[in-house]
RNA sequence: GGGGGUGUAGCUCAGUUGGUUAGAGCGAUCGCCUGUCACGCGAUAGGUCGAGGGUUCGAGUCCCUUCACUCCCGCCA
């Protein structure tokens, strides 16, 4: 028999009454009645109420034992009378009458209470993460994460995928995010990079003939944090398949995500078959390539309206003449919303640094009219045209913004979220997945004006790639796709370009000559020249999936040992100074800017 | 790099228009209490009001600088 326990803290039931047992765990809470002491003993599995009274010689010792001390108790399982049953815990029908106890791990005065479910400052949670992780909510989140990962792994194996590991110390890649670098001792002055994703390796696995690969892969990117983005490191379900078209990838991933989300959440899926939205449509209708489809609001382009003679909103007309566009959001039946609602939206837009959001409400009091500060600038006919374009009715309101396309996309996208939140249009009990497809292969760099890859340079372009098409590179679409759920980008993937000649051509458009490509992508280009299968894949973000399933707004709530916003581990004190000898071995000298 | 929010006891927070000795709950310590499950009751200890500077007769409160945490923009093929 194990020396610490016969049962865990969630196991004992009525059938155990009368048995002598032992439990080990943390003192979660004490209720001291002076001559009678209740102790909630907690372990990973649950809580068992233990009880001791003054008659026992251990009473005084136990009474002054601190919360969160780890103890072992021995005693008898006893019945609880009907009035004292606790329905909130699994072991609530019984309690343990303590006979003996032993301290296994003492506890100093706590910097933060464990039993409480109130919120604590991030700093103290991260510094004492081991205490924070004992708390119910986050403890359960981390267990959920484990279960989700196991489930995904099982599913992938059932689908016929093989799991492989790829190197953590690899080479720096010229495209993409900032790399984490690791100096090489044996190769002075040279550096490894931690992988931003196992992108090239997984393609090489396909070239090596393994057909279907997956990995719960750690990825490292040295970029600034956000609520849904850990600084430094995160995990992807990295997968790649040979001899597939886009649709084959979609089928596998849809099945996996639907199964996973149905298993681990009670929320409804808006679509079992994820809708496919082209990048261009998404940018027009939602102003972003990660739209929240729970939000019913749609953005419409009504630039043409401002070329009409019967529209006299001169500010917008002037901007439109010089190349700006006008886009709008129509809200259903908002005619009775108070003035403060509309002005609040306008003020919000100004606070965000935009020039504001104009608005009017369509009313019909005999005659059709636009009510609101700018309503008078629109003729009846112009209003009817706007109603037609935006699918609006009398009683609806129109919010308008004018500007250059990029800026306009940004404000309308944010306004779409803001207005929907104000109007409470978003059902939080739904997961709305979609595919964003047909990303452009290239885009123009706004600063340098050069043509560059818009996403992954290894993606396969769509259509017939005669030289004629290559003359208009900005029109080339790629077999490149993203999955979005509730406005969060879950993954991106692509059918890869496995033809070296085509790759050289595409790279030349982005300004790389053959030698540069050979040098920067040695492994890849070389491999593709020795019989590469057509292949493609995707990489859903594990942390974000778990975050959605746990109904959390912050990635740290599903990460066991996260870093803070400045990429510091407050518990381990990373990053840290290293001693002179270590630097010397690595041939490094520090030169820190003041 | 830029913008917003927060910072008061170990923890969570209150603190009015600038005005005497900065408060509460939890936790800690001590005492009372045999059926609680956020047990109850009483007492005690516990404060660089994030830090520095300024205005003022007087600053937790106003101003400037700075630090920490956080959210957002930039960034994230």
Image: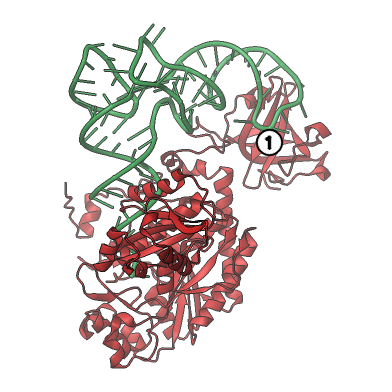
Chain colours: A red, B green
Tell me: A451 left or right of A205: left
Write the residue at 49% across / 44% down. Answer: A130
Q: Nearer the viewer, residue A121 or A574?
A: A121
Q: Nearer the viewer, residue A512 or A200?
A: A512
Q: Nearer the viewer, residue A104 or A570?
A: A570
Classify A50 as above or below A135. above
Residue A540 in view in this figure? no
* Residue A262 location, quadrant: bottom right
* Residue A222 location, quadrant: bottom left
The residue to which callout 1 is attached is A73
State the image coordinates of residue A406 (x, y, percent, origin top left). 32, 65
Looking at the image, how many numbered discs can be counted on the residues?
1
Residue extending farthest bottom: A466
Tell me: A559 left or right of A28: left
* Residue B3 location, quadrant: top left
State the image coordinates of residue A400 (x, y, percent, origin top left). 38, 59
State the image coordinates of residue A13 (x, y, percent, origin top left). 78, 44
Q: Nearer the viewer, residue A415 or A576?
A: A415
State the image coordinates of residue A488 (x, y, percent, origin top left). 47, 61
Residue A326 in view in this figure? yes
Label 1 secondary element: strand
Q: Chain of mark 1?
A: A
């Amino acid at each position: 028999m194990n020396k610490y326990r016969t049962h865990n803290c969630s196991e004992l039931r009525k059938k155990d009454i009368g048995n002598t047992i032992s439990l080990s765990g943390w003192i979660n809470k004490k209720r001291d009645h002076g001559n009678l002491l209740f102790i909630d003993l907690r372990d990973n599995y649950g809580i068992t109420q233990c009880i001791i009274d003054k008659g026992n010689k251990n009473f005084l010792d136990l009474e002054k034992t601190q919360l969160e001390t780890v103890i072992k108790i021995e005693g008898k399982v006893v019945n609880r009378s009907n009035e004292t049953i606790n329905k909130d815990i699994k072991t609530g029908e019984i309690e343990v009458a303590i006979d003996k106890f032993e301290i296994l791990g003492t506890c100093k005065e706590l910097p933060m209470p464990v039993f409480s479910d109130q919120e604590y400052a991030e700093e103290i949670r991260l510094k004492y993460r081991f205490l924070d992780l004992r708390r119910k909510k986050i403890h359960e989140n981390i267990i959920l994460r484990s279960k989700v990962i196991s489930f995904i792994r099982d599913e992938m194996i059932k689908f016929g995928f093989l799991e492989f590991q790829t190197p953590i110390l690899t080479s720096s890649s010229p495209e993409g995010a900032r790399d984490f670098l690791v100096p090489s001792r044996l190769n002075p002055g040279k550096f490894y990079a931690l992988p931003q994703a196992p992108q090239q390796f997984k393609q090489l696995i396909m070239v090596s003939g393994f057909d279907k690969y997956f990995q719960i892969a750690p990825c490292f990117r040295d970029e600034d944090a956000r609520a849904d983005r850990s600084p430094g490191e995160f995990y992807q379900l990295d997968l790649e398949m040979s001899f597939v078209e886009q649709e084959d990838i979609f089928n596998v991933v849809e099945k996996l995500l639907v199964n996973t989300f149905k298993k681990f959440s009670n929320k409804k899926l808006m679509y079992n078959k994820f809708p496919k939205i082209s990048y261009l449509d998404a940018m027009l209708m939602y102003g972003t390539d990660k739209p929240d489809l729970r939000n019913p609001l749609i953005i419409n382009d009504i630039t043409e309206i401002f070329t009409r003679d019967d529209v006299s909103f001169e500010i917008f007309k002037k901007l439109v003449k010089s190349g700006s566009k006008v886009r709008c959001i129509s809200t259903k039946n908002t005619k009775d919303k108070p003035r403060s609602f509309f002005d609040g939206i306008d003020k919000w837009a100004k606070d965000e640094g935009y020039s504001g959001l104009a608005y009017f409400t369509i009313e019909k009091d005999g005659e059709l009219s636009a009510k609101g500060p700018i309503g008078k600038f629109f003729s009846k006919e112009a209003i009817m045209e706007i109603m037609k374009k935006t699918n609006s009715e009398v009683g609806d309101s129109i919010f308008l913004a004018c500007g250059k396309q990029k800026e306009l996309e940004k404000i309308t996208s944010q306004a779409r979220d803001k207005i929907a939140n104000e109007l409470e249009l978003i059902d939080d009990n739904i997961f709305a997945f979609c595919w964003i497809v047909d990303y452009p292969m290239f885009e123009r760099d706004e600063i340098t004006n050069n043509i560059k890859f818009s996403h992954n340079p290894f993606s396969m372009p769509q259509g017939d790639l005669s030289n004629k098409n290559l003359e208009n590179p900005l029109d080339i679409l790629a077999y490149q796709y993203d999955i979005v759920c509730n406005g969060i980008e879950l993954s991106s993937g692509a059918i890869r370009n496995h033809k070296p000649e085509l790759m050289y051509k595409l790279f030349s458009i982005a300004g790389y000559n053959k030698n540069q490509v050979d040098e920067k992508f040695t492994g890849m280009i070389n491999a593709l020249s020795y019989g590469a299968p057509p292949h493609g894949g995707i990489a859903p973000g594990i942390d974000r999936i778990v975050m959605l399933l746990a109904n959390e707004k912050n990635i740290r709530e599903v990460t066991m040992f996260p870093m803070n916003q400045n990429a510091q581990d407050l518990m381990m004190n990373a990053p840290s100074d290293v001693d002179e000898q270590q630097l010397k071995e690595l041939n490094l000298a520090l030169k820190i800017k003041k």
